[in-house]
Amino acid sequence: MPGFLTTHVLDTARGCPAEGLKITLYRVTGKSHRKIAEMLTNTDGRTDSPILPHEAFQTGTYELVFHAGDYLRRTGQAGKEPVFLDEVPIRFGMAEVDHYHVPLLLSPYGYSTYRGS
């Protein structure tokens, strides 16, 4: 099976997918970040295609940045400025050629993630 990376975002405060949330993917090498992709989530809270497709897959260290503040402002959940969660970076490693799924469970004052399937 070829390697690839998928993600999705669930708005746990509202109990629904987080539609229209911008996600940026970076490859991290030492202190260097190289932007690989930028996508918006669809009505299901997912990207329309893998954020790192199998043609571009390489093992290594990556960082997904979820632009949560923009989403929280747009949905009326942000509260006073500055927002508590603005950009949520998740740095992770992919050591094998495999399907990696890194979701974000988001609320205005907290988040969690895990390696999904």
Image: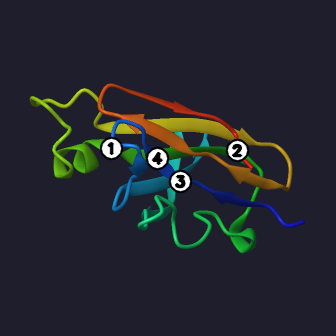
Q: Which residue is mark 2?
A: 116
Secondary structure state at the residue bearing disc 1: helix
In the picture provided, is 117 more to the left or to the right than 37?
right
Residue at image coords 18%, 36% = 78
Q: Amino acid at mark 2?
A: Gly
Q: In the depicted view, which residue is nearer to us: 11 or 67? A: 11
Which numbered disc covers residue 68?
1
For the residues labelled 4 and 3, say whether their Cβ atoms are less than 8 Å apart: yes
Q: Using the rendered image of the protein, determine whether residue 31 is visible from the camera's viewpoint.
A: no
Residue at image coords 58%, 72% = 49
Which numbered disc covers residue 20?
none
Q: Position of residue 66 (x, y in %)?
A: 41, 46
User: Which is more foreground, mark 2 or mark 4?
Assistant: 4
Which numbered disc covers residue 10?
4
Q: Amino acid at mark 4?
A: Leu
Q: In the depicted view, which residue is nearer to us: 66 or 108? A: 108
Residue at the extreme left: 80
For the residues labelled 3 and 1, say whether their Cβ atoms are less than 8 Å apart: no
Q: Which residue is mark 3?
A: 8
Secondary structure state at the residue bearing disc 4: strand
Secondary structure state at the residue bearing disc 2: loop
Q: Amino acid at mark 3?
A: His
What separation in Å lies between label 1 and label 2 (alpha carbons)?
20 Å
In the picture provided, is 72 more to the left or to the right than 46?
left
What separation in Å lies between label 3 and label 2 (alpha carbons)?
10 Å
- Crowding near the residue tagged with mark 2, few <14, some 14–19, many ≥20 C-alpha atoms within 10 Å: few
What separation in Å lies between label 2 and label 4 (alpha carbons)?
13 Å
Secondary structure state at the residue bearing disc 3: loop
